[in-house]
Amino acid sequence: MKREKVLVTGGAGYIGSVLTKHLVEKGYRVTCLDNLVSGPQSLMHLISRPNFDFIFGDVRNEGTLKKLVPKYDIIIPLAGVVGMPQCQKNPVDAVMINRNAILNIEKLRNSSQMILFPNTNSGYGTTTGESYCTEETPLNPISLYGKTKCEAEKALLESDKQAICFRLATTFGISPKMRTDLLVNHFVYQAVSNGYLVVFEKDFKRNFIHVQDIAECFGYGIEQYDTMKGKAYNLGIDSANVSKQELVEKIKNYIPNLDITYKELGSDIDKRNYIVSNERLRKAGFEAKVTIEEGIQELIKGYSLMFAKEVFRQ
């Protein structure tokens, strides 16, 4: 059976390293394009796979994209300046990578090439947290991160070439390129390393998704591309529309001695207070499987291995 050639930009990152491994194991011929800003370690376990290849490069280089894009059947552009703080710190890079590189890829690809794009559901902006955001809910991104991602999604969905766009919930879980700044990952890290959490805006809600489920969903999107293309899909766990307070109480179930303090000493510039419906994706045939509770237990075990000396010195 012929397996398509896949180009994953940013494949060495938090989501990319998990997705690349998933697609390689599915038998796809996967090439990762990355500038290795965080190092090569997250891809080293794939070096022996004959259907994996790596190209050192940067999506900001139009010449690199012009050379590579036409060669692949499937393009998954994960390279990005991720999150509000990093985009504020590097606004020019945020625009060039999160939006302009996607527009260049779209210009260079033909209609027979698949593209599956990761947006963020923080693009829904400020809401009450009481009514579900669906894919028909108007996007109202507040941060530069949300704006650049939503502008890229708009261009892809309005293109005659068509695309699949996944609006990702806040991600959690262990990855070869670990991030401890994501909310669940951060709360669990602080809980096991310090034994206490200080939480602001405790009633603000978000939706969540495990990084392995993201990889599974992108794989499913490739397989079902013809029936799913041309639309955006919220990608999260239906049971994981929870507040910060509900999240830390779940963590406390596994770390009983955790000391929790709620204070109004900060605010989320993104004002992320929303619940999200994942019904469209479920009707398309995909449903996330990994629960927050399973993710919390995984993170506790993962941190015990990754940061044993620092986190568990007691």
Image (tube, helix red, strand yellow):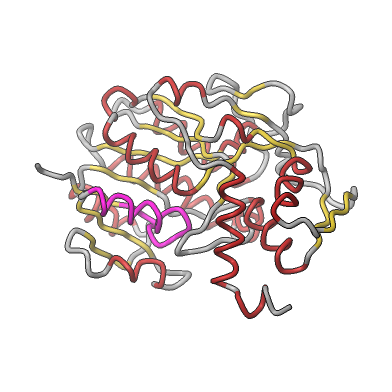
User: Viewed as shown, does residue 199 lie left or right of 163?
Assistant: right
Residue at image coords 69%, 36% = 242
Q: Is 34 contained in the magenta span?
A: no
Image mark count: 0
The location of residue 243, given as percent across then percent down, is 74, 38
Residue 273, image x, y percentages? 73, 35
Asked if 243 appears above or below 158 in the picture, the reply is below
Q: Nearer the viewer, residue 127 or 254?
A: 254
Label the magenta part by its dominant secondary structure: helix
Residue 295 position, x and y percent, is: 57, 50
Residue at the spot 81% in from the left edge and 42% down from the top edge: 202
Q: Quadrant of residue 79?
A: bottom left
Q: Quadrant of the N terminus?
A: top left
- Of residue 56 and residue 53, the one placed in the foreground of this image is 53
Residue located 23% across and 63% down the image: 53
Is residue 17 in the magenta section? yes
Name above or below for residue 308 compared with residue 91: below
Q: Is residue 117 left or right of residue 127?
A: left
Residue at 33 percent across and 55 percent down: it is 20
- 232 vs 208, left or right, is left
Give 114 or 49, whichever is nearer the viewer.
Answer: 49
Q: Nearer the viewer, residue 15 or 250?
A: 250
Figure quadrant of the C terminus: bottom right
Please provide the residue range marked out in magenta.
8-26
In the image, residue 179 lies at what x, y percent? 56, 61
Q: Tell whether 129 sits left or right of 166.
A: right
Quadrant in which residue 110 is drawn: top left
